Image (cartoon, rainbow, N blue to C red):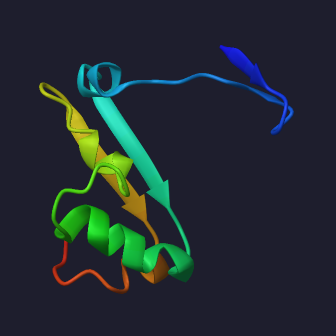
Amino acid sequence: ANFVPKLNAWRLTLTYPIFNAAARVVFLITGGSKASILRDVLEGPPDLQRLPSQGARPTDGELIFFVDQAAAAQLSTARG
């Protein structure tokens, strides 16, 4: 961990190999302000520079998105 003075907080950086080796990667997304980004992450073309969460793809685990209705409003398909 390293201290980030600008945020007055400790920060731990995780890389794709760590995420992708996990048994479970979970994202929690709420609110209408996140709807277009969630749509882009789940349905758009790969763009890891703009959407780094697209790189989280566990090789032998689960990828779970918990979203509320407002965040899911722009998704084109229902997801279970």
Horizontally, is 23 left or right of 3 in the view?
A: left
Horizontally, is 25 left or right of 29 in the view?
A: left
Q: Is residue 8 visible?
A: yes
Query: Is residue 66 positioned above or below 68 on the image?
Result: above
Residue name at image x 18 percent, y 70 percent: 43
Q: Measured from the top left, where is residue 33 in percent x and y?
A: 55, 79
Q: Is residue 80 visible?
A: no
Horizontally, is 79 left or right of 8 in the view?
A: left
Query: Is residue 11 positioned above or below 74 on the image?
Result: above
Query: Is residue 57 positioned above or below 54 on the image?
Result: above
Q: Measured from the top left, where is residue 52 in percent x and y?
A: 36, 47
Which of the 4 quarters of the picture holds residue 10? top right
Residue name at image x 40 percent, y 70 percent: 37
Q: Quadrant of the C terminus?
A: bottom left
Query: Is residue 43 positioned above or below 3 on the image?
Result: below
Tally of numbered discs: 0
Horizontally, is 75 left or right of 10 in the view?
A: left
Q: Measured from the top left, where is residue 73 in percent x and y?
A: 37, 86
Q: Quadrant of the N terminus?
A: top right
Residue name at image x 19 percent, y 84 percent: 76
Residue name at image x 39 percent, y 79 percent: 36
Using the image as rendered, state which of residue 8 and residue 71 is in the foreground. Answer: 8
